[in-house]
């Protein structure tokens, strides 16, 4: 399993977020995943909402799928990045924002007796997540294996839920 360095950056500038763009991107991604299985072009290309070169992700597939989980000890972010390696991905934290970004380059060449096909596709993505309070920034880690990036965000001891069972006695 390859280790991906997590870089911590400091910034005094609040991140500019557009909730409507994020919602539109998510809806486009959902519709694109549904329709591409039937051979239809993506909705964004049909209605020419954005040129293909402005796509947030690679090959029209939308942003990478991400799972967010929480345990008593840590939060985990797992991003599916098929065809990529740890060298294609950068993970950083600025203030309380986790940023995962990467770039994919794909070259495909197919030669047969009567034809020669050569395709190249390039694209990049960037996903940002607001971190909850109580993260132990010194123990953050990221790993990459089998096309999945996993970022582990351990909780500080004071943020971990403490539980003690109390015996109930009769009368």
Image (cartoon, rainbow, N blue to C red):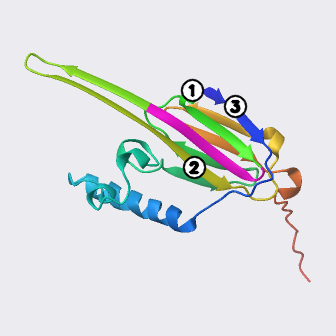
Q: How would you classify the magenta stretch by its main secondary structure?
A: strand
Position of residue 74 measured from the top left corner of the image (x, y, whole percent): 73, 49
Q: Residue at x 13, y 18 (%)?
A: 112
> Looking at the rendering, which quadrant does residue 163 occupy?
bottom right
Choose between 126 and 65: the one closer to the eye.
126
> Looking at the rendering, which quadrant does residue 93 occupy?
top right
Residue at the spot of label 2: 127
Q: Residue at x 44, y 36 (%)?
A: 82
Q: Name above or below for residue 128 compared with residue 113.
A: below
Q: Name above or below for residue 11 compared with residue 31.
A: above
Q: Residue at x 89, y 56 (%)?
A: 158
Q: Is residue 22 left or right of residue 106?
A: right
Q: Residues within 10 Å of mark 3 (few under 14, many from 20)?
A: some
Residue 169 painted magenta: no
For label 1, the SS is helix
| Magenta residues (range) | 95-104
């Amino acid at each position: 399993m390859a280790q991906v360095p997590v870089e911590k950056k400091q910034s005094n500038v609040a991140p500019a977020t557009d909730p409507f763009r994020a919602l539109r991107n998510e809806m486009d991604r959902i519709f694109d995943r549904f329709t591409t299985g039937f051979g239809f072009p993506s909705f964004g290309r049909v209605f020419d909402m954005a040129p293909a070169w402005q796509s947030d992700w690679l090959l029209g597939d939308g942003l990478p799928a991400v799972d967010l989980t929480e345990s008593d000890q840590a939060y985990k972010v797992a991003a599916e990045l098929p065809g990529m390696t740890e060298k294609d991905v950068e993970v950083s934290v600025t203030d309380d924002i986790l940023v995962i970004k990467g770039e994919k380059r794909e070259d495909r060449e197919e030669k047969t007796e009567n034809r020669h096909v050569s395709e190249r596709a390039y694209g990049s993505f960037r996903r940002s997540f607001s971190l909850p309070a109580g993260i132990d920034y010194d123990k953050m880690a990221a790993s990459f294996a089998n096309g999945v990036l996993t970022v582990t965000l351990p909780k500080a001891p004071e943020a971990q839920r403490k539980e003690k069972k109390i015996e109930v006695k009769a009368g």
